[in-house]
Amino acid sequence: MKNADEKLELLIDNLRKQKPELNDSGLLTDGIMNDIAKKRRTNKPVLLIWVRTLSTAAAIFLFALYLVQYSSDQNIAKTTTAVRDFERNIKIDSECIQRNKNRKVNLIKTYKCHLRKNTLKNKHLLAYYQQFINYKNENNN
Amino acid sequence: MDKSTLDKLIIVRSVRNDENAFRKIVEEYQYMVYSLSFRLLCNEEEAKDAVQETFIKVWLRLHTYDVNQKFSTWLYAVSTNLCIDKLKKLKSTYQNTAIDEKILNLCTTENSDQKLLNSELGDIIQTLTNELSPKQKTVFTLSYFEELETNEISRITGLTPEKVKSNLYLARQAIQKKLEKYQI
């Protein structure tokens, strides 16, 4: 009776000698080659990978820059509107001031004119009064 | 020009999408891959599918192959990984009493020249190894049937030489226990 180890070695040895048969090896090769022809190898060159990575990074950077620029433009637009409103208000205010000023100037002018007229009237009145006094004196004499 | 230089030349041409060169690789190595796949999967059709999938994988990944490494080792690694994945999915619960007699016959020297059919050979290997884990089965097949050295098995499977040896020991123990059931 052989021991178990020897029996196992014999079994393994016999199994090793038994080679599995491959009858249609040509057919299998053709099948593999057909499958390969269908599948294009994605053997991307290193340079292409770098170019793709860099262009992706550049695109992301430009998009981020656009977003930043867009938001700052919005802020500027908001500021511009506020400034424009402010300027308009100032303009309105200055027009109002000017109008008031004009009104005051006109009033002064009218007053000055009035004064001038009064001065003339006073001068005439004074001249009449002088004539009256002179006449009175002549009659008394 | 020696064989390894010629192999490298064919591989370089294959990397450059030369399908005729790759056909030469397939013709030269397909039996090696088929033999390993058959002994691991124990089924002719499954083994052929594995061969096909292995070479497609090799074609797609050939540019990652290091020409300083032995090509057959790299090919074994691709094929082994694929078969291990298949083994995990298959989870066979195969049991065939008719095959017991064939196993008994193989344990005697007188019947060693008897040629077995693929189905019989597959059934015998399956009966003997169905309780082994995919890792143990792979190490056992590579060591005893493909007659590879421990270091090469280590490179193929990615296991340390110590783990290869321990897996081999456990596989051997399990098969020996199985043989005891046959009262050999």
Image: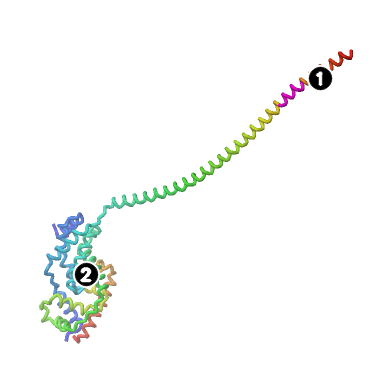
Is residue B126 something that shows in the picture?
yes
Quarter that holds the N terminus of chain B: bottom left
Q: Residues within 10 Å of mark 1 (few under 14, many from 20)?
A: few
What residue is at 28 percent from the left and 69 percent from the top? B159
Could you say which disc has been placed on residue B95 in the image?
Answer: none
Instruction: Tell me where residue B120 appears, x and y as whole percent.
Output: 15, 78
The quadrant where residue A127 appears: top right
Instruction: State the residue position of label 1.
Output: A129
Specify the amino acid type for callout 1: Tyr
Q: In the visual, does A136 lie left or right of B97?
A: right
**Circles 1, 2 touching at the beta carbon (< 8 Å):** no
Magenta run includes residue A121: yes
Instruction: Tell me where residue B148 appears, x and y as whole percent.
Output: 20, 70
Is residue B147 something that shows in the picture?
no
Question: What chain does badge 2 belong to?
Answer: B
**Span colored in magenta:** A114-123
Q: The residue tagged with tag 1: helix, strand or loop?
A: helix
Q: Nearer the viewer, mark 1 or mark 2?
A: 1
Q: Residues within 10 Å of mark 2 (few under 14, many from 20)?
A: few
Cα–Cα span, label 1 and label 2: 152 Å
Q: The residue tagged with tag 2: helix, strand or loop?
A: loop
Specify the amino acid type for callout 2: Glu
Q: Judge whether A137 appears above or below B16 on screen.
A: above
Instruction: Tell me where residue B107 appears, x and y as whole percent.
Output: 15, 82
Q: In the visual, does B58 lie left or right of A109?
A: left
Q: Nearer the viewer, residue B136 or B24?
A: B24
What residue is at 44 percent from the left and 47 percent from the top? A70
Could you say which disc has been placed on residue B149 in the image?
Answer: 2
Quarter that holds the C terminus of chain B: bottom left
Instruction: Tell me where residue A76 appears, x and y as whole percent.
Output: 49, 44
